[in-house]
Image: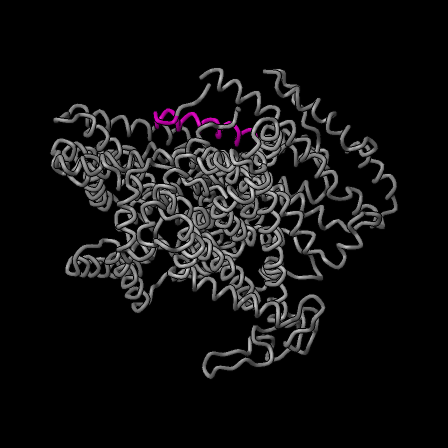
Amino acid sequence: MVTYIVRRLVTAAFILLGASFLVYLLTALSGDPLEELRTSSAPNRQALMDARINLLDLDTPAPLRYFKWLGGAAQCLVPFGNACNLGKNIAGQPITEALGFALVQTLTLVTGATILAILIGISLGIVTALRQYSALDYGVTFMAFLFFSLPIFWVAVLLKEFGAIGFNDFLRNPEIPPVVALGIGAVLGIVGAVVVGGAVRRRLIVGGSVFAAVSLILFYFSLTQWFRNPGLGPVIIAIMGVGIAFGITILVSGLKNRKALQSSLIVVGIGVVAYFAVQPLLNDATGLMIFLLAIATILVGVAVGYFMGGYDRGQSMRAAGLTAFLVGFLVVVDKFMQAWPSYFNNSRVRGRPIATIGAGTPNIQGDFWIMSTDTLTHLVLPTIALILVSLASYTRFTRSSMLEIMNMDYIRTARAKGLSERSVIMGHAFRNALIPIATIVAFDIGALIGGAVITETVFSVRGMGFLFIDGLLHTDPNPVMGVFLCVAITAMVFNLIADLAYSALDPRVRIKA
Amino acid sequence: MSQPTQEEELLAQQALAEAAATHASSEVTSGLSQGQIVRKRFFGHTGALIGLAVFAVIFLLAFTSVGAFGIPGWWKYNHVDVSPLVNDGAPTSSFWPLAWGEHPFGQDRIGLDLFAMTMRGAQQSITVMVLIGAIAGAVGAIVGGLAGYFRGWVEAILMRLTDVIIIIPLLLLAAVVGQIANRRDEGSWLTGFAANNGVVILGIFLGFVSWVGLARLVRGEFLTLREREFVDAARISGASNARIIFKHILPNAVGVLIVNVTLTMSAAILLETALSYLGLGVKAPDTSLGLLVAQNQEAFATRPWLFWFPGLFIILICLSINFIGDGLRDAFDPRQKKFKAKTAIETTRHSSTTAPVADASKGS
């Protein structure tokens, strides 16, 4: 095992050397860094050219320059040496500094989108696999193909037009005409009827109730101008919390396990009480505090599950912990909604909250909630775009993996010995279907850092992709190499993790050391 | 070898499962050659047929309307002709009454005909796509085939080369070679040829960086096939290496190759349009679908048609290629049936004894 890892790492180092040499030469070959200066008419043209030749060391041939660069980069390997030198970009900024900034930007952009895409994609894949050859399956399959074929820059422009400009115009006077409300209700009702499956009668009941509920809620929102002054309040949180408690319990343990259901419901009760208790605390929140509160919430949930016990203590703990987390999430959402009007009327935002470009409103000031809302409103559109284009592969992959598992003999055995369909699917099928998905997820996380070049360009986020493209357009190898190093190293590490995880999860696959 | 060995194992399992399933379904299709079976399955796949038809229409429309290879087309404008604005550039085509009009897709601000530009762009995108598919397929087959058949140091060298290229994210690598392909300064050895055939150069360069995934898949196929009995039999009866490769192994590996070349091509369309959008692919005065979207995205509020039509064509081309690829995969791989529920349930029951196998084509 250790030999295997060491050998993989040594090979990886050599591959990295080869690839970095290749990228350096290709970048240096790709154009003329002095081109814009050659055509300029500035009086000090020659001095500018000399300065740039000096800065980029253009008198040295590219292969030799690579080894100079390598010498600087090798110092990054010395721990705590602080001598890391990846060169400077064309503006004279050290690459290490630029990379640090870009990495933060890229990670804020892609993390949420990837997590959501994985969650939604896997759930859709499982549902379609369970309803193979149904209308839902065909619909989702077609959508997957469509999303797979969407150019992200095209989606992004559409989102900017309708998601930002259109929605902001709507917010100016948030009234939903009754026809539109009924239309949205009807569409969601049809979706509900297709999703729920089963007999026609069941579908009609579900579709009809979704239609009625959605239309009524929209009428209510329109009447109360809810989109201007959104909020949940303790009553709604309690109602939604009970719904969550039942949903989570059905998934985790089944309603038969009364103790699990009771612990989830107790957690919802605690959550509603805590809603009032934490309001003053949340007023001067920080990111760290929210994080600690989230952990505390989960711990409270798990503790409640532990003390309720039941015939399967683990199930109660899991159900209560998950419910606690989701109820806590609702409380935070409510707090964001309370901050919404003041964000909306902020002098920098001026009533147009959904932003089309950038990672934050320039010069905006306010407390934690205002600043976080600002980040979120800037993240909404790129996140939707990224989810749309990466959803398809997860859905397809989970579906085929799940179908394969559902045909296995041990699934038939599990059914034959009388297990409930829930525990067959969640306990036997889903867990095993996750094994191949785990490797895909590891690969994708490894590719995350360099993966959003186009999205960053469209939404003007100055992340890794921007750094790369900008360096390339100026024929400046240093930023290109910096981005490449980060991307390649994470990709290799995560490939290794994927391989190790696979053999750990599936004992049939052995690593030959 | 320090390759992830699980990959080999998975591929081996997959090949075995495939063989088992082919065996199982051969009862239904007895008396037909493999090509006939594949053709029959492919033409039974509705999605693939629709995809094929849509792609054929777009292909003919794009290459005959504005002309290609120096042959003039039947459309009255080309992508650089400026004509007076009709109806302020709005599209003149309509469904009811069905009419084509002077500028069916409208015009841009200075009076260029959008239909001609879109057709030219589709031509360019299809050219790049086909070039990428052909070159990546050929290089991938050669590299993967040699590595998988000869093993030893040939494999070591070729696979390390593949590893070197595969860790550079494709979009980043493509951006670099796209920039090289567009280099137009004096003294460059490409300049003379590239001035007339910019998009061809781009396609060739992109083809030479897109083959790595294919090479790995083909190598996996060769690794399993070379251990089969019929290859041993051929070797014992004195067949040369070339004969074994071309007569015995390649025909059996061609399914994997064709399916994945198709999928590479659908990714290639998006790659080319994305590069052109970023300004690293096809450049003005020539045009491409991605470039059209990039040039016209600011005009969305005033002239939305400039944005809709090029995007629509990107999606149509990519979607049709994806459906064709899906049909081909179903035709070549009997384990994954997605059409005709009844027969599919039959076959999945046959192949239900196989181990869970990661979809090796996912990465392409």
Residue A481 vs B30, above or below: the answer is above
Side (left or right) of A120 relative to B97: left
Instruction: State the residue in front, B101 or A346.
Output: B101
Side (left or right) of A439 relative to A317: right
Estimate the x, y position of residue B249 in percent, counting from the top left. Answer: 51, 41
Side (left or right) of A489 relative to A251: right
Residue B261 vs B20, above or below: the answer is below
Estimate the x, y position of residue B322 in percent, counting from the top left. Answer: 47, 55
Instruction: State the residue in front, A347 or A105.
Output: A105
Q: Which residue is drawn at 79% across and 46% down?
A: A35
> Is residue A507 inside the magenta stretch?
yes
What kind of secondary structure does the magenta stretch mostly adopt?
helix
> Is residue A154 inside the magenta stretch?
no
- Residues rendered magenta in the picture: A487-509
Q: Which residue is drawn at 38% across and 29% down?
A: A289
Q: Which residue lies furthest to the bottom in this view?
A: B97
Q: Which residue is drawn at 22% across and 24% down?
A: A303
**Rendering quarter of residue A414:** top left
> Which of the image's four quarters has the N terminus of chain A?
top left
Estimate the x, y position of residue A248 in percent, counting from the top left. Answer: 22, 38
Count of numbered labels shown in the rendering? 0
